[in-house]
């Protein structure tokens, strides 16, 4: 089977300089693996971050992480004590692909602990 993952998006902004927008129609991605993980997780401010619970996923490829906190941001990292690869503001989300070699991503709250919802797929 092919094209098991579907992603789409849009970004819009309006300011004094006028309105700008960019839309991306649905894109289909192949998934060689069979595993996915969907969950809710409390993210602390622990130094170095906390590993994202992957369940049976061994090589995450694509993820959507939603920060449900109204005040505090989170950082997504390549691993515990790894490099920050994504910042997700309060009441926002990140939809992204992990780079090759990222097998145990981690998250850390900035300020106070937050609750996230997430969905990720195996390569």
Image (spheres, rainbow, N blue to C red):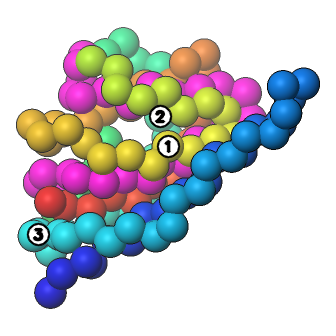
SS for callout 3: loop
Q: Position of residue 79 (x, y in %)?
A: 22, 28
Residue behind mark 1: 94
Nearer-the-camera pick, 104 or 19: 19
Left or right, 36 with respect to 73, comes to: left
SS for callout 1: strand
Nearer-the-camera pick, 23 or 119: 23
Quadrant in the picture for residue 83: top left
Q: Alpha carbon of mark 2 to alpha carbon of mark 3: how far?
A: 27 Å
**Is residue 63 in the magenta section?**
yes
Q: Alpha carbon of mark 1 to alpha carbon of mark 2: how far?
A: 15 Å
**Is residue 80 in the magenta section?**
yes
Q: Residue at x 38, y 67 (%)?
A: 27
Instruction: Name the mark on residue 33.
Output: 3
Nearer-the-camera pick, 46 or 4: 4
Asked whether the viewer can see residue 39, the reply is: yes
Residue behind mark 2: 43
Q: Alpha carbon of mark 3 to alpha carbon of mark 1: how far?
A: 22 Å
Mark 1 Cα shell of 10 Å, populated few (<14), some (14-19), many (≥20): some
Q: Position of residue 123 (x, y in %)?
A: 15, 60
Question: What is the magenta range?
Answer: 57-82
Quadrant in the picture for residue 13: top right
């Amino acid at each position: 089977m092919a094209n098991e993952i579907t992603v789409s998006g849009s970004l819009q902004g309006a300011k004094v300089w006028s309105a700008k927008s960019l839309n991306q129609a649905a894109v289909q991605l192949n998934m060689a693996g069979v595993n996915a993980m969907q969950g809710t997780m409390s993210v602390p401010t622990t130094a170095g971050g906390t590993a994202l619970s992957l369940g049976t996923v061994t090589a995450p490829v694509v993820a959507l992480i939603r920060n449900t906190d109204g005040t505090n941001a989170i950082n997504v990292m390549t691993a515990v004590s790894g490099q920050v690869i994504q910042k997700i503001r309060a009441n926002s989300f990140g939809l992204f692909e992990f780079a090759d070699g990222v097998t145990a991503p981690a998250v850390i709250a900035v300020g106070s602990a937050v609750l996230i919802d997430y969905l990720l797929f195996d390569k």
